[in-house]
Image: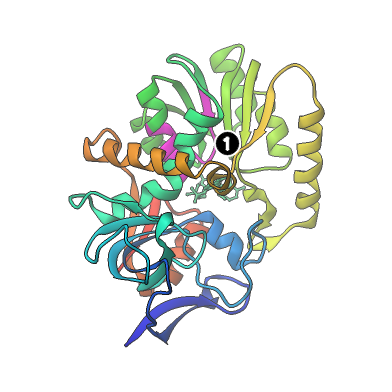
Amino acid sequence: MPYRRIVVSRFGGPEVLQVIEDELRDPRPGEVRVKVLAAGVAWPDYMMRHGVYPRQPKLPFTPGYDVVGIVDQTGAGATLYRPGQKVAALLIYGGYSEYVFIPEQELVPVPEDLDPAETVCLVLNYVTAYQMLHRAVHLQTGRRMLVHSAAGGVGTALLQLGRLIGLQMFGTASQSKHGLIENLGAHPIDYRNEDFVEWVLHLTRDGVDLVCDAIGGTHWLRSYRCLRPGGTLLAYGSQALLVNGRKSLARTVGVFITAMLLYARPGHGRFKFYSITTTRNRHPQWFREDLAALLQMLRERRIQPIIAERLPFTEARLANELLEQGAVQGKVVLTF
Ligand SMILES: NC(=O)c1ccc[n+]([C@@H]2O[C@H](COP(=O)([O-])OP(=O)(O)OC[C@H]3O[C@@H](n4cnc5c(N)ncnc54)[C@H](OP(=O)(O)O)[C@@H]3O)[C@@H](O)[C@H]2O)c1
């Protein structure tokens, strides 16, 4: 039986995303074949498409970091799931596909009543946000947090989870996105027209306890200046590496040197890296526990993922254009 998936066979803009047809195979021993219902579109897809992601797959590859779907067929020895069961998985790549093949121990069961598009937002974005707030640091009610790209996929997850803890929150974003940031309980900062360091110090006097920064490079130095003594700068990405879709050598060197400087800097605040994949490799049980906790929060409507667009998966090119243009508030989801 034929099935369709999206492939990237050369690096470049969204135009390199092509729909192809393949012959569906049976799952191998220990594997589960999953019919995909929803796949997330995320910034790392964009970085991989340009060949600059730290866990870069070789060409040709199918992008797609996270999926929710239905178990379609199980391989020999795979006994944990039965056909028809709803599941989620963090793949890193491969999700823009009608079917995916996943080792059964990497699947997480999903309650039947949850919307697949909302659920897929939890797998990468909310687990990342949750682990930053509950595993990497432990902030108490009333503490202050600054989130960059606050209207984005991970940014909105950080604000929703930070609000549940009772944090005082600040978020940088383009001005057109400030309404969303206010609705999520944070003070918006127009970083394009204002100096966010000055604003944070003006609004708080002595700074914040946590900054979540996926921009990278010298931006981390500025974020560090927003910290209160004893605060933490969590670096979890390097969006600044790509300038108009091209890798910037100067910025790559900048990211490296800045990280070295911040590690070496004594006293004032802490500098930490967070990565969902490294954390899952070290603590696979945390990923399962944290996603299960988030699924329960979604069922109780304590979190409500912001879905920027639901697009058919054959519109992956448009979905990537929207992400790349910064036109997205929340997360773009591909549906099947
Ligand atoms: N470490 C981890 O485990 C982990 C896990 C997931 C994601 N991430 C990282 O988290 C970041 C956010 O991912 P996402 O999928 O949620 O993307 P996103 O935040 O939804 O999308 C990017 C947004 O970032 C803002 N932005 C701010 N500065 C930017 C710059 N210099 N260049 C481009 N955009 C800029 C833009 O919004 P404005 O209009 O407001 O500027 C843009 O809309 C990425 O760096 C990703 O790699 C890391």
**Extreme-top residue of the structure:** 205
Q: Assign the C terminus to one quadrant of the image.
A: bottom left
Q: Can you give x and y, in whole percent of width and height, for residue 135 in the image?
A: 51, 30
Name the residue at 69% across, 31% down. Answer: 222
- For label 1, the SS is loop
327 or 209: which is nearer to us? 209
Report if the beta carbon of the residue with label 1 is closer than 8 angstroms to ligand 1. yes
Viewer can see residue 42: yes
Answer whether residue 51 is magenta in the image.
no
Number of residues whose C-alpha sits closer than 10 Å to that of mark 1, classed few (under 14), some (14–19) or many (20 or more): some
Query: Which residue is identified by label 1?
Result: 191
**Kind of residue sitting beneath label 1:** Tyr
The spot of residue 40 in percent (x, y) is 41, 58
The part of the chain drawn in magenta is: 145-160
User: Residue 314 location, x and y as percent?
Assistant: 37, 75
Whether residue 302 sits left or right of residue 162 in the image: it is left
